[in-house]
Image: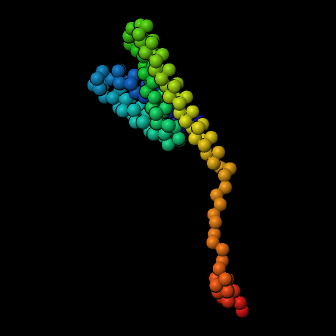
Amino acid sequence: MTGWLLLSAAIVAEVAATTTLTYSNGLTRHALTAVTTVLYVVSYICLARALRADLEISVAYAVWSGVGTAALTIIGVALFGEALNPLKLAAIALIIGGVTLLHVAGNASAAAADSAQAATAGTTTVTATAPLTPSTESKTSERTAP
């Protein structure tokens, strides 16, 4: 759960950074350039910590970039007057579908690994030892005898 919260924070920071980047007028407005830089650093730190919290990189990066792309498409339409057409909507649907499939595939892999581990957890390993020979027994008893 922590990984997903960190990934959510990474997405919010990345979307805010990219939006601020647009307002920075090509990095010519220095205060907004500084804010953009800080937000990108925060985004990467949160993404790195989400990966450290055991999210798979394929899923985490797909969610991070996919949700960010979809959110920025909506922000572009709402704040910057970009056109929203059926092709853009289809692209967002494909991104969401791809991210969902990666997540499902990641869960299926984890479930298969857990099943395999559970199947081997009940097995017992038996180690055979060679029986003691009469000469070994007598040496052992001679050493321990008072």
23 or 15: nearer the eye? 15
Residue at image x 35%, y 24%?
A: 21
> x and y percent of residue 99 in the render?
49, 25
**Residue 55, relative to residue 22: is it above or below?**
below
86 or 40: nearer the eye? 86
116 or 90: nearer the eye? 116
> x and y percent of residue 131 in the render?
66, 74
**Residue pushed farthest bottom?**
146
Query: Quarter-wise, where is residue 129 in the image?
Result: bottom right
**Residue 19, relative to residue 85: is it above or below?**
below
**Residue pushed farthest right?**
146
Q: Quadrant of the N terminus?
A: top right
> x and y percent of residue 32 in the render?
35, 27
Residue 80 visible here = yes
Q: Is residue 131 left or right of residue 59?
A: right
Its colouring scheme is: rainbow
Q: How many marks?
A: 0
Query: Quarter-wise, where is residue 76 in the image?
Result: top left
Residue 42 visible here = no
Residue at image x 71%, y 90%?
A: 145
Q: Is residue 44 left or right of residue 8?
A: left
Q: Is residue 135 left or right of residue 75?
A: right
Residue at image x 41%, y 12%?
A: 88
80 or 11: nearer the eye? 11
Q: Quadrant of the C terminus?
A: bottom right
Residue at image x 31%, y 28%?
A: 30
Q: Is residue 100 left or right of residue 73?
A: right
